[in-house]
Amino acid sequence: MAAIIKKVKKGRAYYYAVQSARVKGKPRIVWQKYLGSVEAILQRYQEIAPVKPSEIDLFDAGGVAALLKFADRLGLIQLINNIVPSKGQGPSLGHYIVLAALNRALEPTSKLQIGDWYRGTVLQRLWGFPSDIFTSQSYWNQMDRISSEEIEKIQNALALNIKKEFKIDTDAFLYDTTNFFTYIATCNDRNEIAQRGRQKQKRNDLRQVNLALLTTNEFQIPLFHTTYQGNIPDVAAQELLSRREKIFGPCKNVMIVFDKGNLSDEVFGKLLYSDIGFIGGVKADLLPEVFEIPADQLKELSFIPGTKAYDHICEMYGKPCRAVVCYSESFFTQQLNALTGCMAKCEEKLKSLQKSLLAPLTGKKRGKRPTKQQIKATVANILSGQYMKDIYQVELNFEGAAYIKYNVDHDAFERIAKMRLGRTLLFTNRRDLLVEEVIRGYRELANIEDAFRHMKNRDYLRWQPAFHWTDQKLKVHTLYCVLALLLATLARKTACENGIEVSMTQLLDELSAIKEVALIYSKDGKMQTELALNRMTPRQKKLAELFDIAEVLKR
C-alpha cells in the first residue's frame, strides 16, 4: 500500500512516497521515491496547476460538420464546379452554393447576414476563407453565373451520386407541389415566375412561386425539382418524370404517387398511356357515382383499422383502371370539424349582413344602400366555402327595403356527412395492387407534405424570405434550398437506419446544440488556442459518433 512519510534530517523535514510489503513475515519498505521539502512540493504543484483561459469562444459545429460530411460524400462542391467552372481566386461557386445550403438548413438568413453566420461557425476554420468575402454583392455575382440548364445538370449529376452513395430505390417516387409567397412588386416586369394564384399560406395579395418535387418514397429524399409560374396549377409532372427516366432508365417498374389537383387533365391522360404505374388522389366529380357509394357497401379493411373501402374497375380516357373509394374515421372527424367551423363563420357573416340591411329601417344607419348586385355578390362570397351553398338556403327580398332570410338545410347537411365527409377517391393503373396497397401507397404522400412544411419552417430549411427579383435568381435560390433539404434528409436517413429514431426537427435541434469551444490562453505575450466540444447528451454523443463530427473538425 502506498503512503507518504516524513524524514527529518539536520532539523529539516523531507517527504517520501513509499510502498510497504511483508518480507519474511515482517513489514518492510520495498520502494520509495523522494518528493522533497514542503516548499519544493508546493512549487512543483503551482507549476502544473491548470491555467485559466483568458477568453472562451463558441462556434456552431454539430449541424455544420454533419451536413458538410454529406455534401463531401456527394462531392457536391466539385460537382457544381465541374458544371460551372470557377473563375479567379478565393471561394468557388461550389463553396457559395454549399454555404447557402448549410445556412438555409440550420439558420436561414439573408445574404447580408450570411458572412456573419459563417464567421460564427466552424466553416471559417475548415475552409480558411475570410468572412468578409461572402457579401451580398459577391453572392449575386456568383448566382448570375448559373443558368436554368446548368441547374438541371447539377440535379441530374447529383441524382446519380445519391443513388451510388446511398443505394436508394429509384422505382418508387412521391410527387407533390407547393407554392411560396414573395414580396416581388406587381410592377416588376422582369419576373415571369412570380404570379398571383391560389396561395396555400393565404397570402393571395402577394405574387407566388410554384415548386414541384419528385422524392424517393423512403425518407423523401428530393432528387428532382423545378420552379414554375405561380398561376399555373401544374406543368411539372411530365418534365420531372422524363428527367427521372433519362437518368435512371426506363420506367418499367416505377410507381409514382400524387395528390388530387397536382396533375392537369392533359398530364393525367398522358400518364394513363405511359408505362409508369401510379396511385393518385383525384377530385370526387371525376367519378361521382362511385364516390357516393352508400356506406353499407364500403368494406372494413382488417389491416388498416378505422378504414373502409369500395373497389371498382372503370375506364378513363379509354384505359381500364381501378378506382378505390377510401373512407377514414379520422379524416371524417377532421372534415366534420372543418365543416362546422366554416358554418359558424358563415352564420356570423350572414347575421351581420342581415343586421346591416335592416339598420336603415330602424333609423340606426344612414348612407347609401347597397345595390342588388352588391348584396348578391356579398352572399356569394360568404357561401364560397365548400358545401356552404348546399347547406344554407338564403332568400333575398328586394321589395321595399332589402333584407335576407336564411336557414340550414339539415337534409343536405346529413347527406353531405354521409356521402362526402371522410372519403377520398383514388385511382391507379396498377390493377394487380390490393386495395390495402393502394391506400397505404397514397398515404405515403403525407411524408412529402412534411418536407414542404419543413421548407416553410421558421427555424430550419426555410425557403422564405427570398430577396431576389428575377426568374434566374429565384431558381438558384430554390436550388440551394432543395440542397439544404437533401442534406438534412440524408442525415436523418442515416440516423434512423442506425437505430436513432428522430424527426427532422429533433435531428437539427440536437446537431445545432453541439458547439465547438475555443479556449484561448495568453502565455509569454502569445495567444494559444485549444479546441474541444461542449458537453453532450447521450443522443448527441451517438449522433456525433455516427457522423464522425470530431474527424470532420480535425481538418
Image (tube, rainbow, N blue to C red):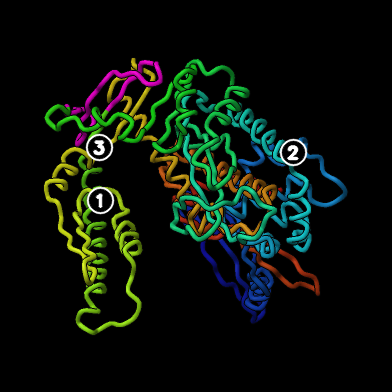
Residue 4: x percent and y percent?
Answer: 54, 67
Q: Is residue 451 magenta?
A: no
Image side of residue 357 versus residue 296, left or right: right
- Asked if the magenta segment contains residue 321, the reply would be yes
Task: Find residue 361 and report its image quarter.
Answer: bottom left
Amino acid beneath label 2: Gln
Q: Dot 3: few (<14), some (14–19), or many (≥20) neighbours within 10 Å? A: many
Residue at left 64%, top 73%? 52
- Foreground residue among 44 and 373: 373
Label 3 or label 2, whichever comes before in sequence order: 2
- Label 1: state its secondary structure: helix
Of labels 1 and 3, the one closer to you: 1
Residue shown at 38%/18% (left/top)? 430
What is the magenta range?
A: 299-324
Residue 494 in view, yes or no:
no
What x and y, as percent, mark residue 83? 76, 36
- Whether 312 is drawn above or below 514: the answer is above
The x and y percentages for residue 31 are 58, 56
Q: Of the numbered discs in the image, which one, if any, rests on residue 423? A: 3
Looking at the picture, does residue 403 appear above or below residue 208?
A: below
Q: CA distance from mark 3 to mark 2?
A: 49 Å
Mark 2 lies on residue? 78
What residue is rendered at 43% in x and 43% in y? Answer: 449
Which circle's residue, 1 or 3, is located before the other in the chain?
Answer: 1
Q: Point out which mark residue 389 bears.
A: 1
Cα distance between the residues tagged 1 and 3: 20 Å
Cα separation between marks 1 and 2:
58 Å
The type of residue carrying mark 1 is Lys
- Kind of residue at disc 3: Arg
Q: Earlier in the sequence, mark 1 or mark 2?
A: 2
Determine the residue positioned at 20% across, 34% down: 305
